[in-house]
Amino acid sequence: MNWFKPKFRKVRRRRSTSVTPHYLAHKEAAREIALARLQYFNNHYGLSWNRVAIRNQRSRWGSCSSKGNLNFNYRIIFLPEHLRDYIIVHELCHLKELNHGPDFWYLVAEQSPDPHTVKKELHEWERKLFVVTK
C-alpha cells in the first residue's frame, strides 16, 4: 500500500575540516601572531575579548561571536602583514559592533584606512591559499 510509504529525508553530512599536518605545523605560530597583533591594536581600541581560537576553516579568515570569542584561520600567517592586520582589526572591531554597518566601518578605518581596497586584495589571496593548503 502506498499510503504507508515512509518518507526519508536526505541527511546532509557536514564536511569536517580535517586536522591536517599543515594545520598542526602552523597553528601555534598563527596564535602567537594573532595575540601579539590583537594586543597591539587593542592599545588603540581598548576592547576586551573572551577567547582566541585558531581554526582550519575552509572559507573564512576570521569571526567574532556575541560572547566575545575571536576565531582566526591559521592561514593568516601566509598573508602579507597589512592583510593579516586588516583581518585582526576587522574581528577586533566586531567586539564593539557586531554588524557591518557604517559605525563598524568607521572603527575599522581608524587602523586600516582603505578597508575596501584591502578586501579586494584579500580575495585574490583566498584563491591561492584556500586551494593550495586544503
Image (cartoon, grey):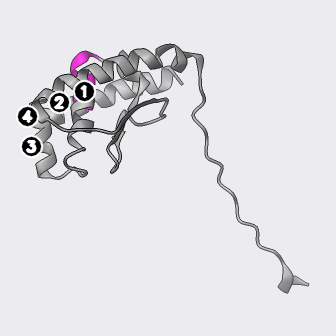
Please name the residue shown 22% across and 29% down the image.
Answer: 86
Q: Position of residue 107 (x, y in %)?
A: 11, 41
Describe residue 52's horizontal placement relative to residue 18 as left or right.
left
Amino acid at the residue labelled 4 = Glu
Magenta region, residue range: 80-87
Cα gap from disc 2 to disc 4, whole angstroms = 12 Å
Amino acid at the residue labelled 3 = Tyr
User: Is 83 in front, or is 35?
Assistant: 35
Contact, CB < 8 Å: mark 1 with mark 2? Answer: yes
Q: Position of residue 85 (x, y in %)?
A: 23, 24
Residue 50's quadrant in the figure? top left
Q: Which residue is mark 3?
A: 106
Cα gap from disc 1 to disc 4, whole angstroms = 15 Å
User: Nearer the viewer's eye, disc 3 or disc 2?
Assistant: 2
Q: Which residue is mark 1?
A: 38
- The crowd level at tag 2 (other Cα within 10 Å; few <14, some 14-19, many 20+) is some
Q: Which residue is mark 4?
A: 110
